[in-house]
Image (cartoon, rainbow, N blue to C red):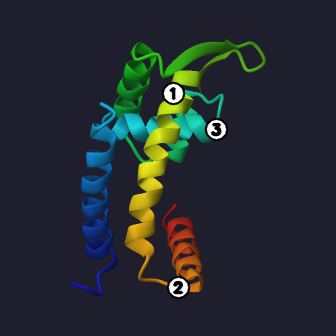
Amino acid sequence: MREILSYRVSVLHALLTRKLSSISSTSTLTTNQWKVLSVLYFWPPITAVGVSEVVVLDKAAISRAIGSLVKLKLAERRHDAESNSTVVVITPAGRKLYGKIQEDIESMQHDALSRLSSSKQAQLFEALDRIEQALR
């Protein structure tokens, strides 16, 4: 099993999700809300379809997450006249919350990767990029 990529990634995903859930639960966000908030932080303004191209969630989960982030005043919907579409942008309150959560996530990632040298960490992320590109 250790040589089966899908199994290893599944185990890592479950472990990371557990850690992420404990971090995001301290801020009352669900994991899906945090993922969408992250996209809004790095890619503003963006449509819901654009979010689905960045994060691997189904469209219904993205829609629910956006709706709840808007209700929490962490994001807002705006009309983009240029593209004649509705875009979602992160609010200042959303940026502030994201920054707080991101500090905790960076600490968790640092702990998880501390057993690897910086060059091994770079190789890991390069390998992950190549695998992701191959699967897309």
SS at badge 2: loop
Residue at the far left in the pictured view: 1
10 Å neighbourhood of mark 3: few (<14), some, or many (≥20)? some
Residue position marked by numbered label 1 in the rendering:
94
Amino acid identity at mark 1: Gly
Is the residue 98 above or below the residue 11 in the image?
A: above
Badge 1 vs badge 3, beta-carbon distance below 8 Å = no
State which tag comes first along the sequence, 2 or 1.
1
User: Residue 57 appears at what percent x and percent y?
Assistant: 39, 42
Frontmost residue, 65 versus 103 = 103
State which tag comes first along the sequence, 2 or 3.
3
Amino acid identity at mark 2: Ser
Residue position marked by numbered label 3 in the rendering:
43
Residue at the far right in the pictured view: 82
Residue at image point 56% right, 15% down:
77
Residue position marked by numbered label 2 in the rendering:
117
Residue at image point 54% right, 46% down:
54
